[in-house]
Amino acid sequence: MFACPATEDFFRARLDQMIDLRHPLAVLSSRMPWQELEARLSHLFMRKARSGVAMPDLDLFGESPVRAARASNAGRPRVPLRVMIALLYLKHAFNESDEGVVERWRDTPRWQYFSGLAYYEDRLPCDATTLVKFRRLLGEEGVEELLAQTINVAVETGLIKPQELKRVVVDTTVQPKAVAHPTDSRLLQTARTKLVEAAKAAGIALKQTFAKEGKELARKAGRYAHARQFARMRRVIKRQRTIVARLQREIERKASRLGQAIQSALGHTLNKAARLVAQTANRKTADGTRKLYAWHAPEVECINKGKARCPYEFGVKVGIASTLKHSLIVGARAFHGNPYDGHTLQAQLEQATILMQDSGIKPNTAYADLGYRGVEADIADVRLVHRGKIKRLTHEERRLLKRRQAIEPVIGHLKQDHRMDRCHLKGEQGDRLHAVLCAAGYNIRWLLRMIANKGVPFLRRAFLRLIAAVRLIGRWLAQRRPTETSGANPAQLRLRAA
């Protein structure tokens, strides 16, 4: 069990006696508003009414007591809320997976101290799947609260001045999804496999599953593409498309004789197969719908950001807002549908304003690149500064515009050090949660780095003050010596000298 911080255990050493309390993570643990954070997130974990389950009787003083003895179906007790919040912070701050963060938490006393424990616990804090359920319960509102509290800590500890939050830099990037590179051959082979599995689950007997031929066609398509024999490759893909369409029609024909429940269960799989058959036959979809790039992640989009090394990325567009100086992230939001960068600016600034509302600050100047031109009417109360109107800028704005490029390494750190390079969370909600959590992990590392850097000037100032005090005492003693010897006769001076 988790020990109470006030409990004294004679046989175990306290964590605050095992670690260096001057470490930035230990300092940050005492600066984070844990109680306020728990109070703001507690309503997300309240018991909700379910169909067929009676809620407890409520009166003026809460739940009425149950006098009759009965077995509890509540299950095991919940992990403390602070521990779960700390695990999410540490996961994205130190680039760990769900399994890796709980394993490293067990072996790191400093992480346990950050989670609010008083004594070292040589066990896992929870199962790795508990983090999946916890993220789902938090939702977008909860993870944004985690990000907002990192901004509040930076302001309250004096690591960044409140007026620095008024000037932000906005840019977009691509958050790739954990999918294989989509090719027509691979998608059609996946569709054939899923159709056969769905038919078997529904009890539909197929005349032929094309298992052996499908595997051979997928192998041939890859070899022909590697050898740049594209005519042969297209013939193979055409045969794969024929097989998928034939299986689709057979399942639809046999499912029409079954019940409505089976037809509705097969409808999603048949719809995806029809989309893949249509998009592989034509370069563009006929009805203007989006293409399907992954069977298990239909929300994935193909985004071109103009990179020579990676022309196309498959994921979702994410907007990032950071302060002009010090590069503290004040907003991160996923935008599905691959919108124009300028059309995301209003929603991005709105999120940044909400996250900074505890500080009473709202952004009034946004620095961006040329992808945000022509949207000044959408943000009437915020001044947009970019290179396209360089002649209308003041000398100070031209100088500060050179800081716009500082958001590029911020995006690089988000991808390389805080897990934005590959999103493993499911669905559109997973994309939104992952983007905000990566930003929260970046801010935690930013706070640790600033606490460590601010400690050196503090010690330097203390040392200089000590030297100044010693010099002042020396001067005072030097001034006092003549006054002490001025009233003495020569015989006394010779005696003192001896």
Image (cartoon, grey):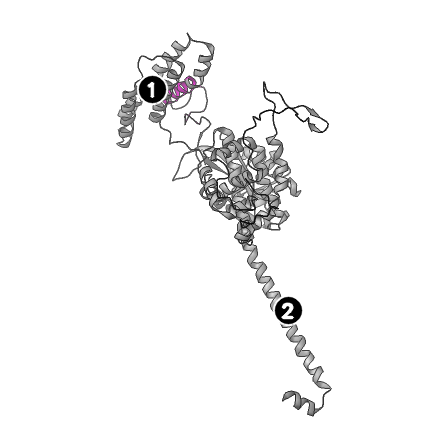
Distance of label 1 from label 2 (alpha carbons): 85 Å
Tell me which label, 1 or 2, sits earlier in the chain: 1
Q: Looking at the image, which is closer to me, 432 or 241?
A: 432
Where is mark 2, residue-wise? 469
Count residues near mark 1 (Cα–Cα under 10 Å), then give few for <14, some for 14-19, many for 20+.
Answer: many
Q: Looking at the image, which is closer to me, 145 or 56?
A: 56
Q: Position of residue 16 (x, y in %)?
A: 56, 51
Q: Quadrant of the N terminus?
A: top right
Q: Position of residue 401 (x, y in %)?
A: 55, 47
Kindly identify which numbered label has been placed on residue 241.
1
Q: How many marks?
A: 2
Q: Which residues are magenta?
A: 270-297
Magenta stretch contains residue 403: no
Residue 389 is at least partly visible in this image: no
Vertical arrangement, residue 229 with respect to residue 398, above or below: above
Q: Quadrant of the C terminus?
A: bottom right
Vertical arrangement, residue 399 with respect to residue 276, above or below: below
Q: Nearer the viewer, mark 1 or mark 2?
A: 2
What amino acid does circle 2 point to?
A: Ala
Residue 427 is at least partly visible in this image: yes
Is label 2 in a helix, a strand or a loop?
Answer: helix
Residue drawn at point x = 50 percent, y = 33 percent: 130
Residue drawn at point x = 35 percent, y = 21 percent: 193
